[in-house]
Amino acid sequence: MSIDEHSDTPESNSVDLSPARTFDDLDGLGNIKERLQTVITSLAEDASIKTHSILIHGPHGNGKTRLANAIAGELAHEGFTVNQFNDCEDAVGEEEDFVTEVVDDAIEASPSVLIFDHISEHYMSEFLMELRAELDRVQTANEQVLVVATAVPTMFGGSVPFDFGLNIELSGPDEERTMALVESYVDEFASQCEVSVTVDLTNEELLEAATGLSATELRLATKSAFQKAATTETTVTTEAFASTLLAVKENRPTSMMDSGPRMTGGEDFIAEETDVSFDDIGGLDEVKAEMRAAMEFPSQYPDVFETCNLGTPGMLLYGVPGNGKTMLAKALASEYDRTFVAVNGPELKNKYVGQTEENIREVFEVARRHAPSILFFDEFDGLAVNRHEASASHEVDFVNTILAELDGFRDTNDVFVVAASNRPQALDPAILREGRLGRHIHVPLPNNDTVRAIVEVHTDKFPLSEEVTPEWIAAEFPKDVPAATITGVCDHALRWHSMRRATEEGEPLEVNKADVRAAIEEYPMPEKEDDAAGSGVSFY
């Protein structure tokens, strides 16, 4: 346990740090600081808000402790007492007494910030169990306490716990933050060493060498470059600095590198720009209107969303297969000029322990890197099963990981999540709540008007004979045929009947009534499936 820095004896478990570090001392992290500032402002300005909890998680060396201290520093300026615990190992086996004691201290010092830095992997489950009960006690005590915890992903057994009010993932620095950190570290050591510096921070080779290093590794490389220059009485040049960065990267411990089986496909496979528009999708006007509303309302009514704590919702598209859910998601991305990041839910599953959870986090990270983006999960019910009906414990971990990632997007418009399912009843109810996938949009089987609209859009450039019109083609279809079957029949009529007749008999290439009727007769019609909405089934 930590001891009071201002005392020779550990009379109290608490350490009143009153840290000077604030958000202004952190390079980059703009979106994260904005999210955290909302919590800080709420606690500082509204005494009726009693408890809140934040988990900062990510790989070693990327600034979790610095960020936790900055949160504490911001609130210290607002009169909050800061109690920090850097090592909880001594409390293993005595979790209940330990957590109760430190929360007692925090309540007595209210308003206060309670920091648990680097929770032990052997301590996590017991810690969360006791902390959950203690936060309820803080609320009852009518005192203000903010709990901040930091941990690395391996401490969660493959999934980030959703016991915390806010989950912040602090992954490796992106390009912007990398260069901000490099600039800050260069300025720091330049002020400490009497050496000449001619580093060009816009140099592409320097950027390439720095990319992929953690914040700690960047600082280590900068310090090493300046120490070498001071020892040899030389200049810190761009080339010398880049060489040092590369040396740190090449000699980093294996444990800090990516390891284990990776997700197949890769980023190039799942991230794309799409040119599909809503105009390319026949009918479904009500569905399109609902999707537009889900995208636009947060920006049209930002004050209401903030005041009522609505968050930025994702959406679930549900209905029988083949009705255009994927096309609708692509059109949404195109309509709002967003990158389309798509993945098939079951394809994320991996036989190696913890790898499925890592794949899930990787997909969300790809969406963040390509923001603003639409993150689309197809066959979502194959991944996000109801935890109460899960056949194995690892399936619960999958859902917990998804919940944690969805909560990370609650207060941002950068990534909008769309999931598709033909079995919405199989999904975990927590995923369907407001602030996660809170908007549920039924994509129905086409009615007569929609069939006509689908045919009209799809055959717009087809060589149709004068006797064949979209209205006539639509009327030939039986009832309750999915959109994919309708477009498939049209293609079949042109490709396998009209073209063959034109080739073999020398007739002009055009689709006639016989071609359409033959295609309908030959094309495999799907078996009738119960529609979640049409059958009166409620799943939320």
Image (cartoon, rainbow, N blue to C red):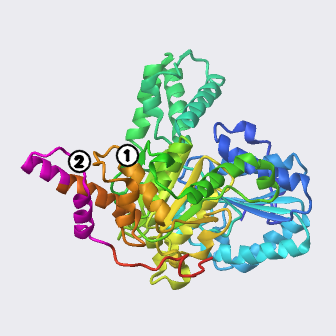
Secondary structure under tag 2 reads: loop
Badge 2, how many Cα within 10 Å: few under 14, some, many 20+?
Answer: some
What count of labels does the image hold?
A: 2
Among the two numbered marks 2 and 1 on one chain, the one whose residue lies closer to the N terminus = 1
Residue occupying image coordinates x 66% and y 23%: 191
Q: In the image, what residue type sits under mark 1? A: Asp
Q: Main secondary structure of the magenta part?
A: helix
In the image, 268: left or right of 305?
A: left
Eye-nearest disc, 2 or 1: 2
301 in relation to 167, above or below: above
Residue occupying image coordinates x 78% and y 50%: 38
Q: Is residue 323 visible?
A: yes
Residue occupying image coordinates x 66% and y 62%: 87
Q: Is residue 371 visible?
A: no
Q: Is label 2 in contact with label 1 (beta carbons under 8 Å)?
A: no
Q: Which mark is residue 510?
A: 2
User: Percent from the top left, x then y, of residue 180?
Assistant: 60, 32
Q: Where, quadrant-wise, is the C terminus in this rendering?
A: bottom right
User: Percent from the top left, x then y, of residue 207?
Assistant: 47, 29
Q: Where, quadrant-wise, is the N terminus in this rendering?
A: bottom right
Viewer-side residue, 54 vs 46 = 46
Q: Which residues are the magenta region? A: 498-525
User: Percent from the top left, x then y, of residue 467?
Assistant: 30, 53
* Residue 26 belongs to magenta span: no
Q: Name the residue carrying label 1.
A: 460
Q: In the image, what residue type sits under mark 2? A: Glu
197 in relation to 475, above or below: above
* Residue 499 belongs to magenta span: yes
Residue occupying image coordinates x 39% and y 69%: 481
